[in-house]
Amino acid sequence: MPDHDHDHDEDDDAAAVAEAEPEAQPNTQAQPDRPAPRPAGKPNAKPLPPHAVVLHNDPTNGFDFVVASLVKVFAYNTPRAVKLTATAHLKGRSIVWTGHKEHAELKAQQLTGRGPDPTMKAQGAKPLRVTVEPLPGS
């Protein structure tokens, strides 16, 4: 199982539907109750390049706090959040989510916005270290 999740984007769905459906033929008859048909999506439009939300190892915040943060922000089940947290702990970093850049930035902000582990504040805990990085090949 990969250490990341591609969150499906509604814009991707709309683009896929537009590509799958044949282009509508213009209606030459006047239909006052219906708005004019919109032209199909741009045929050469490229999908937004994917970015990763990367969780970095943190020696101060508690493992349980990190797991709970992933469950809260990404709605992951606990086993998945444990696996992603363990990867960050053992390898120094873990891709915890992928998607377009703006959404990745929002998710990263939500994760750091949880603040430090309240039980570890006295030991100098800071908010989780998270970065947003373009995926290779994008």
Image (cartoon, helix red, strand yellow):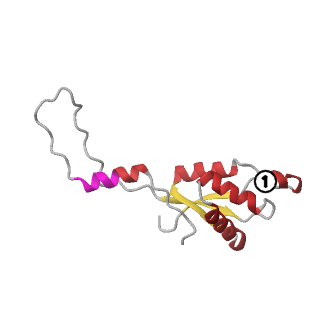
Q: Is residue 134 left or right of residue 29?
A: right
Instruction: Between residue 50 and residue 81, name the one nearer to us.
Output: 81
Residue 51 percent coordinates (x, y): 53, 59
Image quadrant in which you'd find residue 77? bottom right
For disc 1, the neighbor class at 10 Å (few under 14, some 14 to 19, many from 20) is many
Q: Is residue 74 left or right of residue 62?
A: left
Image quadrant in which you'd find residue 65? bottom right
Depicted 8 relative to depicted 79: above or below: above
Depicted 103 relative to depicted 28: above or below: below
At horizontal 75% and vertical 63% (from top left) the residue drawn is 63
What span is in magenta?
15-21
- Residue of label 1: 117
Residue 46 percent coordinates (x, y): 37, 56
**Which amino acid type is marked by label 1?**
Asp
Q: Give the overall secondary structure of the magenta segment.
A: helix
Question: Is disc 1 placed on a helix, strand or loop?
Answer: loop
At horizontal 64% and vertical 48% (from top left) the residue drawn is 110
For this orientation, the residue located farthest to the top is: 32
Residue 31 percent coordinates (x, y): 16, 29
Instruction: Between residue 74 and residue 96, name the one nearer to us.
Output: 74
Residue 75 percent coordinates (x, y): 59, 54
For this orientation, the residue located farthest to the right is: 122
At horizontal 30% and vertical 49% (from top left) the residue drawn is 42
Does 19 lie within the magenta span? yes
Q: Is residue 123 left or right of residue 68?
A: right
Image quadrant in which you'd find residue 28? top left
At horizontal 85% and vertical 52% (from top left) the residue drawn is 121
For this orientation, the residue located farthest to the left is: 29
The N terminus - image quarter: bottom right
Does 65 lie within the magenta span? no
